[in-house]
Each structure stands twice: as structure tokens, then as C-alpha cells.
Image (tube, grey):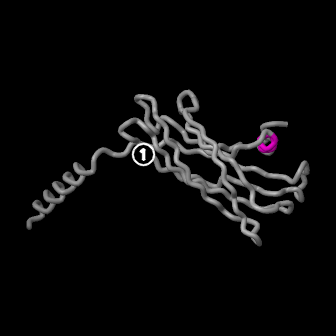
Amino acid sequence: MSTLRRILLGVALAALAAACSGPPPKPCPRLAILGVAADETRFRDAGRDLTDIAFEIEVAGVNLICTHTEAGWLVNELTIGFKVERGPAGEGSPGIEYFVALIARDDQRVLDKKVFAVTLIVPEGQRRTQVFDEVLQEVKLPAGREGKDYTVFVGLQLSPDALAHNRRKRGEEP
């Protein structure tokens, strides 16, 4: 077979493969861990000393896989990783709540927000561990919108005291 025939055959096969693959998938939303809600330090009772730390919890990472349905739904499959460390005052395993929110990038409108609960099992004899939780977010998008028009925010659902503590740590509040 001549070199020209090989090239033409290769081009024809590549064109055929491209024609069979269909349109490229629509882009997913951006993904972000909300900074002020990315971690939590839990204390024993009202104490705020290092010896009063029960648990330190952090949203360590998030993985997102999305699909767009023909009916206009955005389906986000998320795997959220949490790091947890037991402090000097910690006992057992902490339960937490975290949120997954879909926010419009142009006007910051919240299209969807759900709160999930999970227990972060810290095995006896260990101080640290990682726990993963999987959630599904299904949202009907307004006409003409795609995943790329939104950001998925993930964070810990903090109490007012925990939120104030985080803001002080970040220098956002006196």
C-alpha cells in the first residue's frame, strides 16, 4: 500500500470515528469549597484552649462528574472527602452536616442547596482519618442554561459560633 493511500485511509478512519462519537459533552459547573466553611474546630463545652479541642474537621477535596439530560436536567455526582483529627478532648466520632449548593455565576442566585449529614468514623486507637461521602444533585436548569453557567459550592454547615470562630481565624471579624 502506498504512503498516500495509508494517509488517506487514516484520515477516512479518523473522520468516521469522529462522526460516530457524537457531540462533545456539555461542560460541568465550576467547583469550589467555600473558604469560610471549609473547616471546623469543635471544642469541649465552652473551653477555647488547645486542650479543649475535641475535633478538627476539614473538607479536604471534592470530585464532580456531571451529565446534562435531554430534558434539561443537570445531574452532578459528587464525592466529598473529609479529614478529621481527634483532639485532646475528643471522644467517639463526630457527626457533621455539610451543604452542596448550585449558584448562578452571573447573578449569584442560589438555584439549589441541600444539607447532608454524615458521621466521620474515627477508629479507636487512631487520631486522624479520612472519610468520603457521595451525593447526587439533580437540578432542572432554566431554558438556555448549562452547567458552565453555575458554580457548585461545598462547605460545612456551621453553627453561628463555629462560623464566627472561622471568621476570626481568617481576620474577617474582630
Q: Secondary structure at mark 1?
A: strand
- Residue reaching furthest left? 1
Residue under pointer 1: 67
In magenta, the rendered stretch is 161-166
Total number of numbered labels?
A: 1
| Percent x, y of residue 169 | 80, 45
Residue 48 lies in the magenta-colored region: no
Find residue 93 and report its horizontal and vertical position in percent.
Answer: 75, 60
- Whether residue 174 is situated above or below residue 93 in the rendered picture: above
Q: Quadrant of residue 91?
A: bottom right
- Residue 54 in which image quadrant: bottom right
| Front in this rendered view, residue 158 or 114 | 114
Q: Residue furthest bottom?
A: 125
**Residue 162 is a magenta residue:** yes
* Residue 167 quadrant: top right
> Does residue 70 appear left or right of residue 78 in this picture?
left
The quadrant in which the C terminus is found is top right
Q: Quadrant of the N terminus?
A: bottom left
In the rendered image, residue 5, in percent from the top left (x then y), is placed at: 10, 61
User: In the displayed structure, does residue 163 sit left or right of residue 47?
Assistant: left
Q: Position of residue 123 (x, y in %)?
A: 72, 68
Amino acid on which the number 1 mark rests in the picture: Thr
Q: Is residue 82 above or below residue 145?
A: below
At 52% across and 44% down in the image, what residue appears? 137
Name the dominant secondary structure of the magenta segment. helix
Q: Residue at x 54, y 39 (%)?
A: 151
Horizontal arrangement in the rendering, residue 80 relative to residue 6 (left or right)? right
Mark 1 surroundings: few (<14), some (14-19) or many (≥20) residues within 10 A: some
